[in-house]
Image (tube, rainbow, N blue to C red):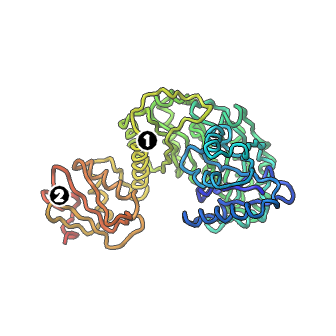
């Protein structure tokens, strides 16, 4: 049996288990719990793993080898708990592989020692060359669709030539980088397209590092003109690629969904500390200009770190709040074998970094949803003009009550953005919720120092009296 016990993957990506497909032999049984638990709750996932463990323990004579893939997330991240749960419960010898095997082996070894299981579990290092693997048609049929279209994952390159100090990819691939045959990749895309696939996710670590080759690939894609076919680059594109205007145009014309750009931080000191291959501030301005010029609906990768001050981090959020882009934020972690210095002074706690990460998502969402920059003075007035709600002011309290329960008003993104808007105009605010489950049916905002009963509705938006009751 070969299996994938991790149960947390992004829905659009949901990568196929390439490591396990690389190891599979005729007659092997594949169990992919990522797929089996897709969109299921925590209780279902636990029961699924418990049931599988019972099956293994009761039928071990059937399996002379069990290989477990620890998943495609770093084990010191937030998404390893079900794989760890499996390890703590399994009572038979197994072999472990995984994309982060080189940078989490000691952590897993320490866990196994604490469980007194180190003698029953070993590690294997399968080939990382997935280019030759074709996902079986039966597996493609079994995976959830994207907008009712069949999906598949593939790779164009292997590894990364860069030497960023905080990244585990160089450790995993032993500093090697390989670009696969472009014609073979084009033929594979045509093969998948003829199977009905209309959504291809590339899981390369750095697909645009060899920009000349990637542009040739994009030209060939454009020439194919396969109607309805869309692409996603899971790990995103290099910043420098977006300085090339032909690249920008081809990305648009060949239908790459939400192109992701690894800008990571606007601080030159930060980029130098992590050994980034670009540090010049003018690069990000040119990138943002090209995004707007070619109307690219981009997603910006940001990286926050404990050695940054809160002011610096908010500066990053403010900068991207001026543009109509999504953001995705990661918090820097020290991977085993990487070169990032561990003696850097901590200026911002991990807890606060997570709060700032939420603020970044809120700012991005407010800009895209309402075209409101939550850091600008007068943002509340602008928002209420476009999105009128019933407003009451009684006893020093401003109350905003939605007539309809729009789905987004039950999210942190809305309330965090609203809190920041009020903070910019009036000082510190506190948002309270209706119930312990954070189900937001109304929002009470208490203004610190200048209570809302001292303000008039017309202070918030023109014509406000018509909404006041």
Judged left or right of residue 140, residue 114 is left
> In front here: 280 or 123?
123
Describe the element under mark 2 as helix, strand or loop: helix
State the image quarter where residue 241 is shown.
Answer: top right
Counting from the top left corner in percent of width and height, residue 120 is at 73, 46
Provide residue 349's location: percent of width, then percent of height: 40, 39
Q: Nearer the viewer, residue 82 or 460?
A: 82
> Does residue 322 appear in the picture of this structure?
no
Asked which quadrant contains residue 204, the reply is: top right
Label 2 Cα crowd, 10 Å radius (few <14 / some 14-19 / many 20+): many
Q: Which mark is residue 452?
A: 2
Which residue occupies the foreground of this view, 75 or 411?
75
Query: Horizontal placement of 361 versus 171: left or right?
Result: left
Residue identifier under label 1: 350
Q: Quadrant of the N terminus?
A: bottom right
The image position of residue 238, as x and y in percent, is 59, 39
Residue plotted at (66% across, 50% down): 71
Give the CA separation, mark 1 to mark 2. 34 Å
Is residue 29 left or right of 466 when viewed as pictured? right
């Amino acid at each position: 049996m070969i299996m994938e016990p991790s149960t947390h993957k992004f829905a659009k990506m949901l990568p196929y288990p390439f490591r396990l497909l690389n190891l599979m032999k005729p007659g092997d049984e594949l169990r992919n719990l990522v797929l089996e638990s897709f969109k299921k709750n925590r209780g279902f996932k636990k029961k699924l793993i418990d049931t599988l463990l019972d099956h293994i323990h009761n039928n071990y004579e059937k399996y002379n080898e069990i290989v477990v893939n620890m998943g495609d997330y770093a084990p010191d991240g937030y998404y390893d708990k079900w794989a760890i749960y499996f390890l703590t419960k399994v009572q038979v010898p197994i072999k472990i592989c995984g994309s982060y095997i080189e940078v989490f082996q000691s952590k897993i070894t320490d866990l196994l020692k604490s469980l007194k299981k180190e003698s029953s579990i070993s590690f294997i290092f399968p080939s990382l060359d997935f280019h030759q693997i074709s996902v079986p048609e039966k597996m493609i049929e079994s995976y959830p669709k994207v907008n009712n279209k069949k999906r598949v994952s593939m790779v164009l390159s292997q590894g990364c030539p860069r030497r960023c100090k905080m990244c585990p990819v160089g450790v995993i691939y032993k500093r090697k980088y390989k670009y696969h045959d472009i014609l073979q990749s084009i033929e594979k895309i045509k093969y998948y397209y003829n199977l009905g696939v209309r959504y291809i996710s590339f899981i390369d670590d750095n697909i645009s590092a060899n920009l000349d080759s990637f542009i040739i690939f994009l030209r060939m894609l454009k020439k194919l003109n396969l109607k309805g076919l869309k692409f996603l680059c899971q790990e995103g594109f290099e910043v420098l690629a977006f300085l090339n205007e032909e690249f920008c145009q081809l990305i648009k014309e060949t239908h790459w969904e939400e192109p992701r750009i690894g800008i990571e931080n606007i601080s030159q000191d930060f980029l130098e500390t992590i050994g980034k291959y670009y540090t010049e501030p003018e690069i990000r301005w040119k990138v943002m200009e090209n995004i707007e010029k070619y109307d690219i609906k981009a997603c910006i990768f940001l990286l926050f770190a404990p050695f940054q001050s809160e002011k610096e981090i908010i500066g990053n959020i403010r900068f991207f709040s001026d543009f109509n882009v999504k953001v995705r934020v990661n918090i820097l972690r020290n991977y085993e074998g990487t070169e990032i210095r561990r003696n850097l002074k901590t200026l911002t706690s991990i807890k606060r970094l997570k709060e700032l990460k939420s603020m970044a998502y809120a700012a991005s969402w407010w800009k895209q949803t309402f075209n409101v920059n939550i850091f600008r003075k007068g943002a509340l007035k602008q928002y209420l003009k476009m999105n009128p709600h019933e407003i009451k002011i009684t006893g020093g309290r401003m109350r905003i009550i939605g007539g309809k329960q729009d789905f987004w008003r039950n999210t942190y993104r809305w309330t965090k953005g609203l809190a920041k808007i009020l903070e910019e105009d009036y000082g510190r605010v506190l948002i309270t919720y209706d119930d312990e489950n954070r189900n937001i049916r109304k929002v009470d905002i208490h203004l610190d120092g200048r209570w809302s009963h001292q303000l008039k509705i017309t202070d918030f938006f023109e014509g406000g009296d018509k909404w006041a009751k």
